[in-house]
Image (cartoon, grey):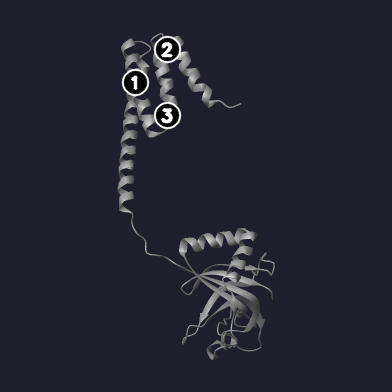
Amino acid sequence: MGLTLIYIRIGNSIIDYRFYSKELAPVSVVDDAFIGLVIFKEKIGQKSDICILKLVEKEEDGDSSGSHFSEITAESRSKVVSMVNCTRLTPISGAWLKLEAHLASCVACELSRSHIFRYRFIKWLRRKRKLHPIPYSHYQQPAEYDAVIDCDMWINSTVEIQSFYSKQKIDYAWCYRMEGQAAKKAALEETMAWLSTLGGGYSALGDYFQHHAMEAGRISLKQLKIAVEMGDPIVAAKCKLFFAQSLMQRGYMQQSKLIIRYVYKPNTHD
């Protein structure tokens, strides 16, 4: 079969894989009987094989035997036996890459979604001579596999991306800088909360007492300064409206109208 298998491996586990056709279009090998891909590794030596596990049901006359993974799933009087079929993938050519875990994740994502990226990725492997034929000795099945592997399936190629986690370095300088910014942000928000409470109280009494209306205006200007320092344009616009309300309470209608129009105009869209 002209299939290409690209998979990411960490240790002896396959964490992600995709099958592609000869034209590098995604191909699904998953069906109701599909279990997953596993890595079989020799006890002696470094040779390893990728195998497809599928659950199949067979009828037998006597006790179940044969596959190493056999298990009777029906009642004792039933002859239907559920067995795990193990098919070894035998590629004609293969490539092995070792990438850092974050980069491997990005490569896997792009391979799964972009046909152009897949095409250029395979072309890059061929140009760099990383995709090479697998020698015949690799196809020879060890004796320990006889009781496990049921059959072989030939595919065009496999690309193994071995993922590893590099040693992480803690950036203490950036941590201290962010700690100071976070503390400043928390202090500004706390100050804003206190001023909002005081400003609301003074503004409520500003309809009856001029002094309270003036104090509410001063508090709104302090809030505006903090909002600009925090970089929050929405809160800054609210503070301008609070100051405009203070001006209305003191009888400065024209100045209040100008502030309200100034705040309203940039925030409207046709």
Q: Which residue in the structure is indicated by mark 3?
A: 235
Q: Are marks 3 and 2 in contact (CB under 8 Å)?
A: no
Q: Nearer the viewer, mark 2 or mark 1?
A: 2
The answer to which of 176 and 116 lies nearer the viewer is 116
Question: In the image, is 116 to the left or to the right of 261?
Answer: right
Residue found 31% across the figure and 31% down from its top: 191
Distance from Cα at disc 3 to Cα at disc 2 = 20 Å
Q: Which residue is mark 1?
A: 201
Q: Earlier in the sequence, mark 2 or mark 1?
A: 1
Hey, which residue is sitting farthest front in the picture?
Answer: 127
Q: Nearer the viewer, residue 61 or 32?
A: 32
Marked residue nearer the N-terminal end (1 or 3): 1
Name the kind of residue labelled 2 in the image: Met
Q: Position of residue 78 (x, y in %)?
A: 64, 81
* Lateral position of residue 29 relative to residue 201, left or right: right
Q: For this rendering, which residue is in front, 262 or 149?
A: 262
Q: Residue furthest bottom?
A: 143
If the image is split into quadrants, where does the N terminus sit?
Answer: bottom right
Dot 1: element:
helix
Residue 265 at least partly seen: yes
Mark sitting earlier along the chain (3/2): 3
Left/right of residue 128 with respect to residue 154 in the rendered view: left
Res. 148 image quadrant: bottom right
Report if residue 196 is visible in the image.
no
Q: Secondary structure at mark 2?
A: helix
Q: Which residue is mark 2?
A: 248
Q: Position of residue 80 (x, y in %)?
A: 65, 81
